[in-house]
Amino acid sequence: MATISRRSFLKGAGATAGALAISNVTAMPVYANERTGSAVLTAQRWGAMLVEVKDGKIVSSKNALPQTVENSLQSTAADQVHTKTRVKYPMVRKGFLENPEQPTGKRGDDEFVRVTWDQALKLIRTQEARIRDAYGHESVFAGSYGWRSSGVLHKAQTLLQRYMTMAGGYTGHLGDYSTGAAQVIMPHVMGSIEVYEQQTTHDVVLETSDVVVLWGLNPLNTLKIAWSSTDGSGLEFFHKLKKSGKTIIAIDPMRSETIEFFGENAQWVAPHPGTDVAMMLGIAHSLVSKKQHDVEFLNKYTAGYDKFEAYLLGQTDGVEKTPEWASAVCGVPAKQLEILADIFSSNRTMLMAGWGIQRQQYGEQKHWMLVTLASMLGQIGLPGGGFGFSYHYSNGGNPTRDAGVLPALSAAIGGVGASGARSATTGTYNFPAARIVEALENPMGTYQHNGHEKTFPNIKMIWWAGGANFTHHQDTNRLISAWQKPELIVISEPYWTAAAKHADIVLPITTSLERNDLTMTGDYSNQHLVPMKQVVEPQHEARNDFDVFADMAELLEPNGRSIYTEGKTEMEWLNGFYKEAQKIGRQNRVPMPNFTHFWKQNQLIEMKWNAENAKFVRHAEFRKDPILNPLGTPSGKIEIYSKTIESFNYPDCPPHASWMAPKEWVGAAKEGELQLMTSHAAHRLHSQLNYALIREQYAIANREPISINTQDAKARGIKTGDLVRAYNDRGQILVGALVTDGIKQGSVCVHEGGWPDMEQQHGLCKNGACNVLTQDIPSSRLANGCAANSSLVRIEKYTGESLTLTAFMPPKNG
Ligand SMILES: Nc1nc2c(c(=O)[nH]1)N[C@H]1C(S)=C(S)[C@@H](COP(=O)(O)OP(=O)(O)OC[C@H]3O[C@@H](n4cnc5c(=O)[nH]c(N)nc54)[C@H](O)[C@@H]3O)O[C@H]1N2
Ligand SMILES: Nc1nc2c(c(=O)[nH]1)N[C@H]1C(S)=C(S)[C@@H](COP(=O)(O)OP(=O)(O)OC[C@H]3O[C@@H](n4cnc5c(=O)[nH]c(N)nc54)[C@H](O)[C@@H]3O)O[C@H]1N2
Ligand SMILES: [Mo]
């Protein structure tokens, strides 16, 4: 990392003359695509796509919307459908099929036997009924967390839960892995979750910010996707930002794809992973000692700053959080922290933060401290100032369009609130998503969550549809043990994932390219309405989740299918959703063609630009009048100190943002140990596409790559391309070495999402799945978020016997 001078930092600061005008794009909805040709228009998480088909097979796919920055995920449609990794038929684990009530063998070790759809569904129904009878409805876990495909109809979890609702109920989950910690702490601090909300718009930032800070933010990767489907605007924004001449500061232990993209237009500052709170405290201390903090803002808009300042100055714990103190923790020179304090306070500064920083032990503190720092800078609610927690996700700065917005299928039959609607789970035992293994290990055990004592369910059956919990959950070997406990595990999947290989019953499901659906783009913008057209016939014996659960409903009760489907076919549902969107469109003066015409056109609809929305500044109303527009916190202000959190009395979540050393981090590393980061990968969405051809662009030694600092590699005799064993007490993985100066010394990175490919007896993964090594602990009692990024590992050149990669091979007979 280059040392940073005040001069190099300031290069470009304030250079915002010739500001970009707020663009006026579309006055009327248009069919945006003129280059469709013979291609079929569809959409996935990674955007609207044009897919070419020849003789019933996909031959190519590409972006449907114009774009400056390429999105590598859009080229993968052919692999998604035609890969050898597809589940072809319903299959049942041998020991389970032979005796479903007293099965022999072990999940993950046993053979699979092909059965018919009819056999598989009847087997599930019989065992499900037995389990519900014996242990109650809450023993069925159907939380089914995960990034199933886009679409408002073919929503795997919802379809599963809709069936489970009819069957008597189920236990679900709370929160998510993404922002588990931040989404629970933020309502206490800001009165809103902040992480999934419209941000000050891209145009306003381009026009008014002088300094943009990318705090643990890798938008070049993470903006390739959105929850609905990406509208593409975020990548375009970062492209413009790069050219804007503004001061860009990226704070990240890794020289991420984004930092590479900015090149010399950004300054890279690399703290040790997990130490951002200490780093921010050092900056905050510098602000106070130079009286650069905004006392007026703190008095008017925040509560409890005095208590925080006493901590900052060491009056409560005897440790003054000076830049020197912070530097010793975070590994960034004290002088640089002071310079950062100068720059932040003397410019219009937007602090954009990602979420990897809170997927750590004490993750709650990160975003709380960031809001505290932003409060001290006093720019929250000003155009281009303050903080934003969704610039790297779902294009959070793209303003909301005047749109006809699609509704979506709900888990309640007949729609929420409809007369005779059957409601879903009671939710008594719903537990935080990332606590699944504890729930399995500790049935009916109690735990703390956000001020409440809660009880884990007694899980006897799991049905997962649309998630990949064997890759997404921490400490895989611990998961594999806990996973033996339920009496029935069903996995609905297009692919032979590790979870499928560890199931009793596996059902082959279509990909979104084999069925019809609809989606909006942009989770905030609603920029487009896109037909998700079926591109090819369902492969092998794959069926839609919708049809599978409709069949299950028919096994449940007379006429069950038509209750489940409400008597409507796929196209009738889509027609209905579209008509609803049309109605909303009409209210917003957005005319839309009729459904038949729309569907035939093979074109998407771009929604109407709203010039007012384009000027949106987050928290501007609160800033204008904090009495009339209070925040949703107990004080109505930004809670730098929370009396509510104080009342919980949690040792792992004190009442103001605080530095607490995690159990595993660089500072606690024994000789030879390195801290593992598990960031999100450029060329896949979590585990999705790990099997695809695009893997050749990143795999090293035919494994997941591990980024290692040059010095750390040298000390261990490791070179780029070497096969490396990374290990700790929890397990071991084989990875391919990528030696680089682009990662802080003392840390390594293996991206999340590699498929576990376990050599069971050694607890070793042949593909390099990072979660074999990660700790499965909660962020804290407050949020119980995923804390994967707080883990230590050792690495060495692998010298053992050669092991064949089997991650993407179907099991025997599969
Ligand atoms: N170490 C570490 N672990 C992490 C993270 C981290 O940063 N570090 N990040 C965490 C985060 S933020 C998240 S969100 C999770 C992601 O975890 P997941 O969302 O579970 O990951 P995906 O790989 O997207 O899983 C989606 C699965 O659904 C399947 N699928 C797709 N469409 C359909 C469909 O129509 N029907 C059915 N039945 N199945 C379908 C896909 O084949 C795939 O297996 O991972 C978490 N895990
Ligand atoms: N291509 C692609 N896009 C995705 C996803 C995907 O899997 N692939 N997943 C989607 C999902 S579900 C989510 S939740 C989001 C995830 O979005 P994030 O959680 O923000 O993504 P991460 O990659 O975990 O982390 C972002 C950056 O933080 C850095 N970082 C890690 N630890 C630290 C630290 O301690 N301090 C600092 N300062 N920086 C740190 C990493 O090096 C990385 O560059 O992305 C979404 N977008
Ligand atoms: Mo996520």
Image (tube, rainbow, N blue to C red):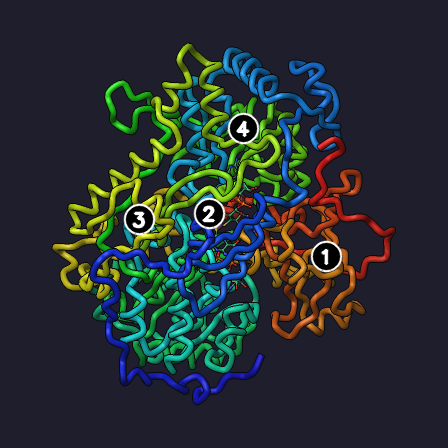
**Which numbered disc flags the more N-terminal residue, 1 or 3?**
3
* Element class at badge 1: strand
Whether residue 75 is situated above or below residue 291 in the rendered picture: above
Q: How crowded is mark 4: few (under 14 residues within 10 Å), some or many (20 or more)?
A: many
**In terms of depth relative to the viewer, which is nearer, 495 or 713?**
495
Q: Residues within 10 Å of mark 2 (few under 14, many from 20)?
A: few
Q: Name the residue under label 2.
A: 651
User: Disc 3 designates what residue?
Assistant: 643
Circle 1 crowding by C-alpha within 10 Å: few under 14, some 14–19, many from 20: many
Which is more foreground, mark 4 or mark 3?
4
Q: Which amino acid does label 4 sit on?
A: Trp
Element carrying mark 2: loop
Q: Is mark 4 on a helix, strand or loop?
A: strand
In the image, taking residue 79 as reference, residue 642 lies left or right, namely left
Kind of residue indicated by mark 1: Val
Residue 781 appears in the rendering = no
The residue at which mark 4 appears reads as: 463
Residue placed at 61% from the left, 72% from the top?
Answer: 742
Q: What residue type is labelled 2?
A: Pro
Against 348, residue 516 (above or below) is above
Find the distance from the CA under tag 1 to the CA under tag 4: 31 Å
Quarter residue 486 falls in: top right
Q: Distance between the residues labelled 4 and 3?
A: 40 Å
